[in-house]
Amino acid sequence: MRTAILNGTLVSAAETLPYDLYFDQGSILGAVPRGDQRFGPPEMSIDATGKYVLPGGVDVHTHLDLPMGAFNASDDYATGTLAAAHGGTTTIIDFVNHARGESLLKNVEAWHQKAAGRAVIDYGFHMTVAEASPQVMAELPAVVKSGISSVKVFFAYPERLLLDDPSVFRVMQRAADLGALVLVHAEDGPPLDILVEQARGRGEWAPINHALTRPEVAEATGTERAIALAEMAHAPVYIVHVSCARALTRIVEGKSRGLTVWGETCPQYLCLSEDDLRGTPEDPFAGAKFVCTPPLRPKIHQEALWRGLAQGHLDTVATDHCPFNYVGQKDRGRNDFTKIPNGLPGIETRLHLLYEAVTQGKLSLERMVEVAATAPAKIFGLYPKKGSLLAGADADLVIWDPIRPVTLNAQSLHMRVDYSTYEGRTVPGSPMQVYSRGELLIDRGCAKAAPGRGRFLARAPA
Ligand code: URP
Ligand code: ZN
Ligand code: ZN
C-alpha cells in the first residue's frame, strides 16, 4: 500500500529536511518537498507534524539467548527483538557463540534455530572465534559465504575465549582475504585474571571489585595491540565496547595514521559510571546490576566519549545488550563478584538516551542518526538497505516524537529482565511509530508485530 508520512522532519546522517516520505511494498519510494505529489496520491497517510522521521536504528552488538556459565542471557530472540523495536531499533547483529572444540558452522546453525520463528526485526550474525584451530580456520570461508562477514576475537577471558597474538594475527589475515571484518574485545585479560585472584585472596567480594580489577590501562594497551596487529595484517579492525578515554586515544592515533580502525561505544559507558557499581551504602551488592565488561569507568570518561562521538573519533553506538535478572542470576554472585554474570540490558533504550544527549547539546540529531543507524549499516555491509532514507532502501522507519517523554523502568520497558539500569530516569522523547520493511511494528507503545517476521540478513564480504 502506497503510504505517505506527511508534514514530518526527515533526519538522515547528512541533513534535516521538512519533506514528506513515501513508501510502498516494503521499500522507500522517495522523499519529496511537502505537498509534492510525484508519487501519486497515497493510499494511506500518517501525519508526522512535529515529529522527526529517522531511519530505523541498527544495533550491531547484541547477545540474545547467550549461554554464559550456568545461565542464559534473559532475552531470547522473541523478547529481545520486540524490545528493540519498542526502542526504534529495526536491525540487529547478534553474536553467534563459539566454544573451543566446537564447529563454527554447527554454532551458526544453532543460532539460526534460536532466531527462526521468533525474531520481530531483521537480524544478522557476527561469528565469535574462541580458537584459531585448523578446523576453525578451515570453516571460516563457509561462515563468510553463509552471510556472516564479521568475526569477533577476544584478548580477555583466557580460560574460554582468549586468542594469543599469533592466532589473532592469523584470523585477521584470513578475514582480510575473505573480505570479513574482525571485531576485537580489546581488554588485555591475563593480568586482569591475576588481579581478580588477588582481590579474592584479600576477601574483597563486592561488585565494585569488578571495576577495580579491570583497569583502564588493560583496555588501552589491548586496543593499541589490536590496531598494531591489524596494521601488520593489512586488515581493517573494529574495536567493540570502548569504555574509556585512553582506549579512545589509541583509536584516534590509529585513524590519524590512515588505518581503517572503527570504534564502538555503548550507552552504558556514556551514561553510567563506576559509582553505579558501588551500589548504595545500605546495599553495596545493588552494584551487581551494573556489572558488565569492560566495566563502567569513573564519570570523567563520559565526557571524553561524548566528545569522541561528536567529533567522529568513535563511529558507532551499539548496546552490547546482554541482560541477566537481578534475582536468580546476578544475585548468584552475592558473596563473590566473579560469579555475577557480566552484561547489561540496553537494546530498547539506545535511541532514548542518544536523543536525550541531543537535547543536552552533546551531539547533533544528524550525528545521532549516523552513529545509531547509518554508520553501523555501512561498516557491516547493510547500507543502503538499512540505515538510510534513500529511495530503494527498506522502509525501516522511526517516527520520533521529541516531546513524548518516558520514564525508564523495568515495568515500562519490554526487555525480559527484572530491573533497569536507568530506573526512574525520564528521557524527553520516544518513538511514536516504528516500521520495518513498511510494516507497522510499534504504534504509540503498542506492539503490532508478530514474532518470526524478522529475516536473516546475509551480508556480503567487503
Ligand atoms: O558484559 C558483557 N559485555 N557481556 C557480553 C560479552 C562481551 O564481552 O561483549
Ligand atoms: Zn566483548
Ligand atoms: Zn558483547
Image (cartoon, rainbow, N blue to C red):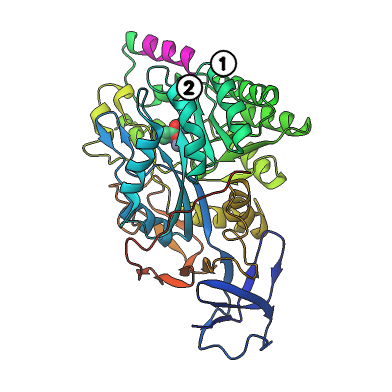
Q: Quadrant of ligand 1?
A: top left
Question: Does 416 appear above or below 109?
Answer: below
Q: Name the spot of residue 271 as percent of width and height, x first.
A: 51, 43
Residue under pointer 2: 132
Residue under pointer 1: 166
| Left or right placement of residue 420 versus residue 271 in this view | left
Image quarter (top left, top right, bottom left or bottom right) of the C terminus = top right
Which sits in the foreground, 112 or 331?
112
Residue, x 37% and y 23% (percent of image)? 100
Amino acid at pointer 1: Pro
SS at mark 2?
A: loop
Which sits in the foreground, 326 or 258?
258
| Left or right placement of residue 185 versus residue 179 in this view | left
User: Dot 1: within a 10 Å radius of its alpha carbon, few (fewer than 14), some, or many (20 or more) residues?
Assistant: few
- Asked whether the residues under the numbered discs 2 and 1 touch, taking CB atoms below 8 Å apart as contact, a structural biologist would say yes
Amino acid at pointer 2: Ala
SS at mark 1?
A: helix
Residue, x 58% and y 61% (percent of image)? 385
> Cβ of disc 2 within 8 Å of ligand 2?
no
Q: Name the spot of residue 312 as percent of width and height, x first.
A: 70, 44
Labelled disc at residue 266: none
Q: Is 46 colored magenta in this rendering?
A: no
Q: Is 197 colored magenta in this rendering?
A: yes
Question: Does 177 appear above or below 50?
Answer: above
Q: Name the spot of residue 97 as percent of width and height, x first.
A: 38, 35
Is residue 292 in view?
no
Q: Report the predominant secondary structure element of the magenta stretch.
A: helix
User: Dot 2: within a 10 Å radius of its alpha carbon, few (fewer than 14), some, or many (20 or more) residues?
Assistant: many
| Of callouts 2 and 1, the N-terminal one | 2
Q: Name the spot of residue 181 as percent of width and height, x first.
A: 59, 37
Rendered image quadrant of residue 364: bottom right
